[in-house]
Image (cartoon, grey):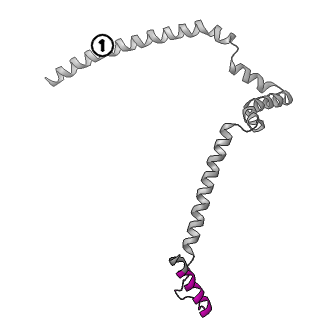
Amino acid sequence: MASKQLDSLKISSAKLIADKESRAKTLQTDLDKKVIETQPIIDGFDGLMARINALGKLPSLPSFFIMLLFLAIETSPIIAKLLSPKGEYDFKQEDLEMGIKNVISQNRYQSELQKKPMPKFTTRCMPISKKTKNSIITKRKAHWNY
């Protein structure tokens, strides 16, 4: 019984394999036809790769100037930004940076103050002469009595 199932499975899978192989062969022939049809177009095409190959065949001096041209094109926005005067954005950016610097310096100053020991205050008063004491008392009496 198992051998019959195996034989029937082999026959059915052999048919599927043959169908898939024939389909693959037809797809490959179609692909080959398309490649043959489009090859003249690709050969006559003057694309980027042809230009890169041509640059490789140039002498060193023209190649060097072409490289300088590409370098100038790539760096021109940066150079334009550096040469332009300050604008609104630059002023706002500077204000923001100065605000951050001020906050940092204030925090540093406060931390330095916290590190310093507190001065000791005394509750003793300076000695006053009797004459000064009497003049203070008379001024207070005059003030309160009008």
In the image, the segment drawn in magenta is 119-141
Residue 115 visible? The answer is: yes
> In this view, which residue lies farthest toward the left?
1
The x and y percentages for residue 128 are: 60, 91
Q: Residue at x 54, y 8 (%)?
A: 34
Residue 72 in the image: above or below residue 30: below
Q: Residue at x 64, y 51 (%)?
A: 98
Q: In the rendered image, which quarter is residue 105 located in?
A: bottom right
Residue closest to the eye, 134 or 127: 134
Residue closest to the eye, 104 or 124: 124
Residue closest to the eye, 81 or 31: 81
Residue 124 in the image: above or below residue 27: below
Residue 129 visible? The answer is: no
Which residue is under mark 1?
15
The x and y percentages for residue 87 are: 70, 37
The x and y percentages for residue 81 are: 73, 36
Q: In the rendered image, which quarter is residue 19 located in?
A: top left
The x and y percentages for residue 139 are: 57, 81
Q: Amino acid at mark 1?
A: Lys
Q: Callout 1: helix, strand or loop?
A: helix
38 left or right of 49 in image: left
The N terminus lies in which quarter of the figure?
top left
Q: Residue at x 59, y 93 (%)?
A: 130
